[in-house]
Amino acid sequence: MWGDPLRNAVGLYPDEAAMSSCPLEDVGPWTYVAYRSTGVWITPEGQLTDAAAVLPEVRADPIPPTYRRAGFDVVALDQTGFACAPLTCSDVLLERGSNAFGLFDTFEEAVTEGQRFARTHGLEPPPYLVVEVLERASEDAAPPSPSA
């Protein structure tokens, strides 16, 4: 993606070391986030299928335990990898709301809304991948809960 050999098959950096290679002056203020596939792929018809059947194998390190769940999202993918997320890219969150991170609180909510997005014209076109989004916590944060 964008000619960056450090990115994986879906256009993301596979680990923090690779992500650290991104020049900060080019991106402004940011924080480390990680994405974990839930394994759910939403077709253009709003049907659910196994993401492993349609996505390329993705190289990524295990997510460190210093990351905490921020929520779930539904992301469109194109030939270069992750594209837009209808919740934020199409201002859907202004209509329906979201959590403090601009995400869905639950997996079930993300799937239900993702199916609705797939059947709604004027949003980022499907198919979509349902992902868990994790944010790197500060070094002095409490350890993750067993449900995270």
Image: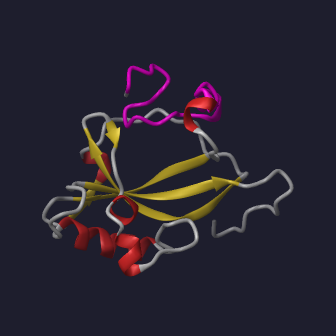
Q: Residue furthest bottom?
A: 96
Find residue 96 and report its image quarter: bottom left
Q: Where is residue 78 in the image (x, y as percent from the top left)?
A: 26, 41
Q: In this view, does 19 lie to the left or right of 136?
A: left
Give the magenta-colored segment's residue range: 2-24
45 vs 29, nearest the viewer: 29
Find residue 99 and report its image quarter: bottom right
Magenta segment, prevailing SS (helix, strand or loop): loop
- Please tell me which residue is depicted at 42% across the width and 62% down the height of the picture: 73
In the picture, the quarter occupied by the C terminus is bottom right
Q: Position of residue 55 (x, y in %)?
A: 29, 42
Q: Residue furthest right?
A: 140
Q: Does the magenta stretch include residue 11?
A: yes
In the picture, the quarter occupied by the N terminus is top left
Q: Is residue 128 left or right of residue 67?
A: left
Q: Where is residue 34 in the image (x, y as percent from the top left)?
A: 56, 48
- Please tell me which residue is depicted at 46% across the width and 36% down the height of the picture: 12
